[in-house]
């Protein structure tokens, strides 16, 4: 009986801890997006780990945090960064409760996008460590999209293959 009670207590603690983590992660991600919408440079990058990676919608957009800060600074300085609002989000917390991964559908100026990433707990605060932004394309429109971007993609692929 004591073993069962101990198991129930440990399991309940883990479940409640993960639910609390999910609430904190949701708040951190919402604040991160809000900081961009308000062009709050310090708050936005303060919610990213020092070694964070941001992968944008363009094939050339694979930035380390400092590079992304440099790229983004002029937008924030003009008071107009980007404005993303989560309309759906799934969060998965590791057993150790210090790392989690998520995916989200976003309402953006590009219409529906998908974000996915990894958050890490740093000094008790959840921060974005890796983020991937993708434009959601309905399957029935993929052929048209491929045709629109074919020339540019072909040039980029050729360039990337030459670098190898």
Image (cartoon, helix red, strand yellow):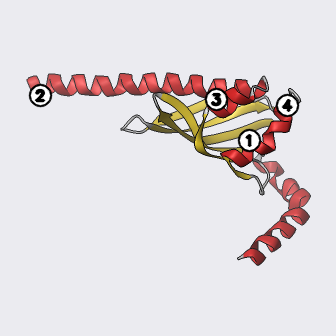
Q: Is residue 159 shown left or right of residue 6?
A: right
Locate the C terminus and report the quarter of the image it occupies.
bottom right
Disc 2 is placed on an element classified as helix
Q: Residue 117, percent across and down?
A: 59, 42
Asked which quadrant contains residue 135, the reply is: top right
Report the residue at 86% width, 37% height from top: 74
Q: Residues within 10 Å of mark 2 (few under 14, many from 20)?
A: few
Does the CB distance between marks 4 and 3 fall below 8 Å? no
From mark 2 to mark 3, how far is it between C-alphas? 39 Å
Check residue 69 in the rendering and tell me which mark sits there, or answer none.
1
Disc 3 is placed on an element classified as strand
Disc 4 is placed on an element classified as helix
Q: Residue 152, percent across and down?
A: 89, 63
From mark 1 to mark 4, how far is it between C-alphas? 11 Å
Whichever of labels 2 and 3 marks the residue nearer the N terminus, that label is 2
Please give the residue where the numbered disc 4 appears in the rendered image: 77
Whichever of labels 4 and 2 marks the residue nearer the N terminus, that label is 2
Does the CB distance between marks 2 and 3 fall below 8 Å? no
Nearer the camera: disc 4 or disc 3: 4
Q: Residue 109, percent across and down?
A: 84, 33
Whichever of labels 1 and 4 marks the residue nearer the N terminus, that label is 1
Whichever of labels 4 and 3 marks the residue nearer the N terminus, that label is 4
Disc 1 is placed on an element classified as helix
Whichever of labels 3 and 1 marks the residue nearer the N terminus, that label is 1
Please give the residue where the numbered disc 3 appears in the rendered image: 88
Nearer the camera: disc 2 or disc 1: 1
Nearer the camera: disc 4 or disc 2: 4
Check residue 3 in the rendering and tell me which mark sits there, or answer none.
2
């Amino acid at each position: 009986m004591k073993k069962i009670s101990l198991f129930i207590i440990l399991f309940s603690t883990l479940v409640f801890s993960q639910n609390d983590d999910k609430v904190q992660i949701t708040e951190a991600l919402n604040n991160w997006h809000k900081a961009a919408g308000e062009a709050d440079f310090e708050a936005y990058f303060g919610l990213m780990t020092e070694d964070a990676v941001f992968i944008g919608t363009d094939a050339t957009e694979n930035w380390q945090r400092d590079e992304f800060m440099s790229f983004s600074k002029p937008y924030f300085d003009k008071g107009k960064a980007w404005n993303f609002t989560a309309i759906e989000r799934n969060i998965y917390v590791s057993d150790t409760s210090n790392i989690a991964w998520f995916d989200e559908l976003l309402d953006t100026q590009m219409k529906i996008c998908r974000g996915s990433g990894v958050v890490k707990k740093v000094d008790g605060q959840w921060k974005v460590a890796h983020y991937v932004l993708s434009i959601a394309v309905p399957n029935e429109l993929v052929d048209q999209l491929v045709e629109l971007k074919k020339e540019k993609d072909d040039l980029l692929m050729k360039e990337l293959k030459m670098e190898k």
